[in-house]
Image (cartoon, helix red, strand yellow):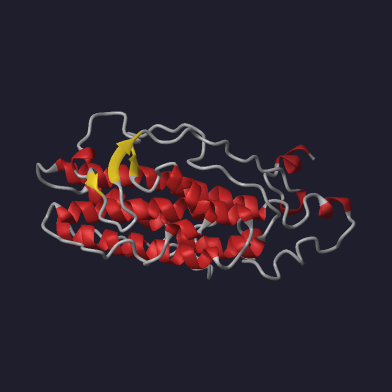
Amino acid sequence: MYYYKEGLINGIKPDKPDPAAAKVLQEALGGQFGEMRTMMQYFFQSSNFRGKETQYRDLMKGVFLEEIAHVELVQNTINALLDESGGAGVGSQGSDQAPLDEAVKHANPHHYIMGAQSSLPVDAGGNPWNGSWVYNHGNLAADLLNNVVLESTGVLQKTRIYEMSSNQTLRETLGFLIVRDNVHQNAFAKALETLGVDWGKLFPIPNYDINKYPECRKFVEMGYHNTQFDFRLDPHRMGEIFQGQTPSRNGGDLSVTPPPEAFPVPHLSEMPNEHAPGLGDMNA
């Protein structure tokens, strides 16, 4: 069973509305290597795990639980980038016959037509999230290898999305996620080490200095690049895998720690233009 406490795993940094940035960030949410995929892949792998070596199951479950928080963070970041991007309340005042016209020129129009200026379970091209991307064939080594590829490709894409916009709302979230994706690379790489794999100097993928990103550097200084957050309320064996020296060139020792204190979830204002939430219609 699962419990929920309202709060984000990292804060939303304020900046101006940016629907173009929201569009590209959708790839990190609903794309083939996005957070929805990682969440569901580790969920199925941990739920379907067989055998007594439950430390591997617990590692997958632990990362899955964090990925739920990543989905929530990206959703709220997209919402913040879209909030009032169409000019809140303009249409209701009759001062503009097409208040959303300018907003959708460089955006995903479905953000406005389907989502009322909010996130959607799609990629940057507007394609719906696809459950066929979820990889779980029941072989531990194969699943772990696929997880390493998933996390590596995810962080590769995030570094590219980072270069597509200088918006600080987008870059703050990407900086946090890049660091955490590196951690999860290390988690699954460490699990494969226990099965006999010698990584040498392969990680992280891509080969880059994480400190070149200002938004990443502060999280490295906080030790977030070498710690797996523990969201479990019951005993587990995750720490039997996530320990010792990191397999990454970034160096340091791995540890399991409590998650950070929660950050507030931004409040989204009502939008008469898009009848959201629509309570005004009911009271008319």
In the picture, residue 153 is in which quadrant? Answer: bottom left
Q: Is residue 231 above or below residue 93?
A: above
Tell whether 19 sits left or right of 211. Answer: right
Tell whether 113 sits left or right of 89. Answer: left
**Residue 27 percent location from the top left of the image:** 49, 64
Residue that appears at 87% across and 60% down: 96
Residue furthest to the right in view is 95
Q: Is residue 33 visible?
A: no
Residue that appears at 66% across and 47% down: 14
Tell whether 282 sits left or right of 191. Answer: right
**Residue 141 percent location from the top left of the image:** 16, 59
Residue that appears at 28% across and 59% down: 147
**Residue 116 percent location from the top left of the image:** 65, 54
Camera-side residue: 8 or 280?
8
Camera-side residue: 95 or 103?
103
Pick the quarter of the image with the N terminus.
top left
Q: Is residue 98 visible?
A: yes
Camera-side residue: 253 or 161?
253
Residue furthest to the top in view is 234
Count of numbered labels shown in the rendering: 0
Residue that appears at 44% across and 62% down: 129
Pick the quarter of the image with the C terminus.
top right
**Residue 139 percent location from the top left of the image:** 14, 58
